[in-house]
Amino acid sequence: MHSVTFKKRQKRLRRLTATAIEQYQMIDNDDKIMVCLSGGKDSYVMLDMLLRLQQVAPVQFELLAVNLNQMQPGFDAAILPDFLQQLGVPYRIISEDTYSIVTDKIAAGKTMCSLCSRLRRGIIYRFAEENQCTKIALGHHKDDILETFFLNIFFTGSLKTMPPKLRSDNGKHVVIRPLALCDEKDLARYAEAMQFPVIPCNLCGSQENLQRKMIKQMLNEWEKDYPNRKNTIFKALSNAAPSHLLDVNWFDFAGLNNGKTAATDKSWLLPSHKAATLSSPSHLEDSQEKPLIFRP
């Protein structure tokens, strides 16, 4: 028997997942969604949420759970197949020895995440294309999005993060992040209560002083000193004002003139972004096509 606290957390996670899917229009009718399972807490919860939504969503979609076995020493290859068979979920296990490649190319003690991520992405994209998957679902959550935002600011000098929905550079794949609005602490507690068989990552999980860990610590300290700061920053990511930033590629500063207001003058938008603005979720009320309504 689950506690009242568990049921509230489950309801909150289902609501936030449904809200993210609806807000960013992640799922369409007849989609075949490749659910990427790493064996970590986040991907387990994502699969759980999508299975529930599959039962109540106003559209029909197919789920295919996929795990990439990177041949890491000590990895128990039986855990995920056993779990998925008991769950009755269609699944595939991809075995690729990326571990040997990463450890051969990266010197001992150096961060392996970047190369490992690139290798995984290539394998996942190839599998999705070969198996006619229309969407690729990843288990990144709100904290991942915030951390990536600051990583890009501090280390690459760019103002970007993990978007809830992303088209690959070659245009062939659409990546979705159904847990984009969910807090990591809720996911951890839910996964523990559900007793998901979490598999630790022995490749990079033990590496210390990673940039992401430093950013996580910074955000947690901010949150401790100023409660709700992370939510405020996250809200800012969906409340951007290009005219109050410095990027001349996104705002036509030269085109600003006296005598007009923001409500009447849209000339500042560059042509490539006028069309994007008109087709964005905030303008759906002007379109004949209404968003799908997902309910937990």
Image (cartoon, rainbow, N blue to C red):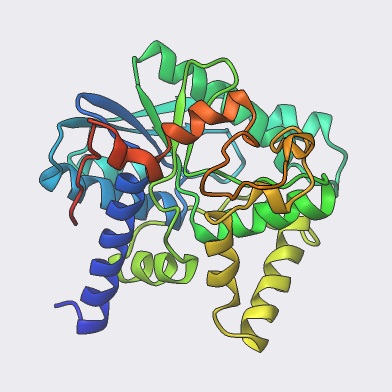
Question: Which residue is farthest bottom?
Answer: 225
Residue at the spot 26% in from the left edge and 30% down from the top edge: 28
Q: Which quadrant holds the N terminus?
A: bottom left
Q: Is residue 20 above or below residue 129?
A: below
Q: Is residue 239 shown left or right of residue 289?
A: right
- Whether residue 166 is visible to the viewer of this picture, yes or no, is no
Along the viewing direction, whichever of 183 and 245 lies nearer the viewer: 245
> Which image quarter: residue 137?
top left
Q: Is residue 139 above or below residue 36?
A: below
- Whether residue 139 is visible to the viewer of this picture, yes or no, is yes
> Which image quarter: residue 88?
top left
Figure label count: 0
Along the viewing direction, whichever of 11 and 270 lies nearer the viewer: 270
Residue at the spot 29% in from the left edge and 68% down from the top edge: 12
Q: Position of residue 155 (x, y in %)?
A: 83, 50
Residue at the spot 86% in from the left edge and 44% down from the top edge: 108
Q: Position of residue 32 (x, y in %)?
A: 28, 25
Residue at the spot 29% in from the left edge and 65% down from the top edge: 194
Q: Which quadrant holds the C terminus?
A: bottom left
Q: Position of residue 222 (x, y in %)?
A: 68, 79
Q: Is residue 261 above or below residue 128?
A: below
